[in-house]
Amino acid sequence: MSIAIEATGLSETQRQIVDLAREFARTRIEPHAAEWDRTGYFPRDVLDELGRLGFLGMCTPEAFDGMGLDTLTYFLALEEIAAADASIAISVSIHNAIPTTMLVRHGSAAQQERWLRSMARGERLAGFALSEPESGSDAGALATRAVRDRDGWLLSGTKAWATNGGTADLMVVMARTERGISAFIVPTDVPGYRPGRPEDKMGLRASNTVAIALEDVRLPADHLLGEDGQGFRYAMEGLDVGRLGIAVQAVGIARRALEHAVAYCAERRQFGAALREFEAVQFKLADMATRVEAARALTHAVAGRIDRSEGFTTQASMAKLFASETAMWVTTQAVQLFGGYGYMRDFPVEKLFRDAKVTELYEGTSEIQRIVIARGLYPRG
C-alpha cells in the first residue's frame, strides 16, 4: 500500500496534475520549508511560480483562464503541496477557495474580467478578511463598517488573522453596511489599507498572517461584490469550500508525518531490532495509516458531492473536523515514535506537529464544526 496518492484509478489529466504538483512540491518547496519556518519568510516567488503553472486557477472556469478542474483533482494537487509545506498550501487554498468562489458565483461580468482572470493566471494573489479581534467564531458580530460616500464606499475597521493580508494584491473584505454584512474587493495598494507585522505563530510560520487596519479606505461603487447585505451568505458559501481546503491540508500534513515515521521506524534500531519489528510500534503505525486513509476518503467523498451539485455544508464540516483531528493525532504519534529526536527542530515531525494544530482552529474551530454537523442532523422543514 502506498501512503501517497496512487496513480491507479486516476484519469490521465489527474495523473499529470498530481505528477506536476508532486514534482514541484518536492523540488521547489520541501527542500526550503524548514528554513522558511525558522525565519518566517513568505516565499512570494514560489507562489508566483505556482500561479504560472496554473495552481492558483484550479477552481476558476476555463472561460476566465483557469484550469476548470473538478473538485477531486483540485484536492489531489493541494494534498501534494500540503505534504511539502502547509504554509504554501494555505495560501493556495485560500486564494482558490474563498475569493475565487465568491467572484465566480457572485461577481459581475466586469469584476470577473478585471479580477478573476488575473487571479487565475497567477498575476494577482488574493486573500480573505472576515475575522476581527472581537469577532472570531461569532463571525456575524464583525464591526468593520462600510458607508456610502458620494458614488462609492468608505471602509473603516480592523481585521485579524488575515492570511495573505500583507502580501496579497487584493483582499475580499467583509464589512457591515446599512443593509447587513457585505463583501468588498479591496486592492491592497489603496490608501488606508495598512497590514500589520506578520504574526509570530506556533506553526505555518511561512504563511503571511497579519492584522489589517482599514483607515477610511475609499472604494468605487463597483468594488461591492454581489448584492449589498448578502456578503455573510457569500462568506459562508466560500467557507464551506475553504473548510475542505483545510481538510486536505490536514491530510497532507498527516500523510507526511506518517511517511517520516514509517521510514524512521525501518531505520532506527533499539534492543537489537528495528523499531518496525516491535508490535507496539506496528499497532501505532497501523492506526496512523488507517486514520490518514479515512480522512482522505472523507474529503474525496465530499468532492464528489460538490461536483454533483449536491449540498455539502454538513459534510464539509465533517471532513474538516475529522481530518484536522487526524492531523493532530498522527503528528503527535509521529513525535512519540521519533522519541527525543521528534522534539528536536533538526527532525521534520516537530514542524508537522506545530503546523497541524491550527487546522483545528481556523476556518471554524472543531467546536464550531460540531455545531454545524449537529444542526445538519435536524434540518429545518
Image (cartoon, grey):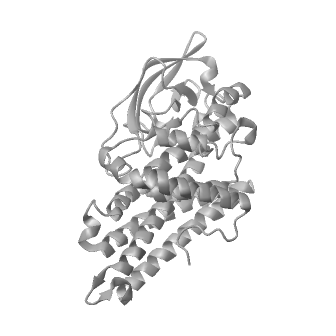
Q: Is residue 295 above or below residue 184?
A: below
Q: Is residue 287 above or below residue 152?
A: below
Q: Position of residue 78 (x, y in %)?
A: 56, 54
Q: Residue furthest front?
A: 27
Query: Quadrant of the image for the N terminus?
Result: bottom right
How many numbered circles does the render carry? Answer: 0
Q: Position of residue 236 (x, y in %)?
A: 58, 44
Determine which quarter of the picture holds residue 350: bottom left
At 39% from the left and 50% from the top, the residue drawn is: 204
Determine which quarter of the picture holds residue 194: top left
Q: Nearer the viewer, residue 157 or 304?
A: 304
201 lies left or right of 164: left
At 65% from the left and 46% from the top, the residue drawn is: 59
Q: Is residue 206 above or below residue 378?
A: above
Can residue 363 be seen from the camera position used here? no
Q: Is residue 135 above or below residue 309?
A: above
167 lies left or right of 227: left
At 41% from the left and 75% from the top, the residue drawn is: 263
Q: Nearer the viewer, residue 298 or 142?
A: 298
Q: Position of residue 159 (x, y in %)?
A: 42, 33
Q: Residue furthest top?
A: 150
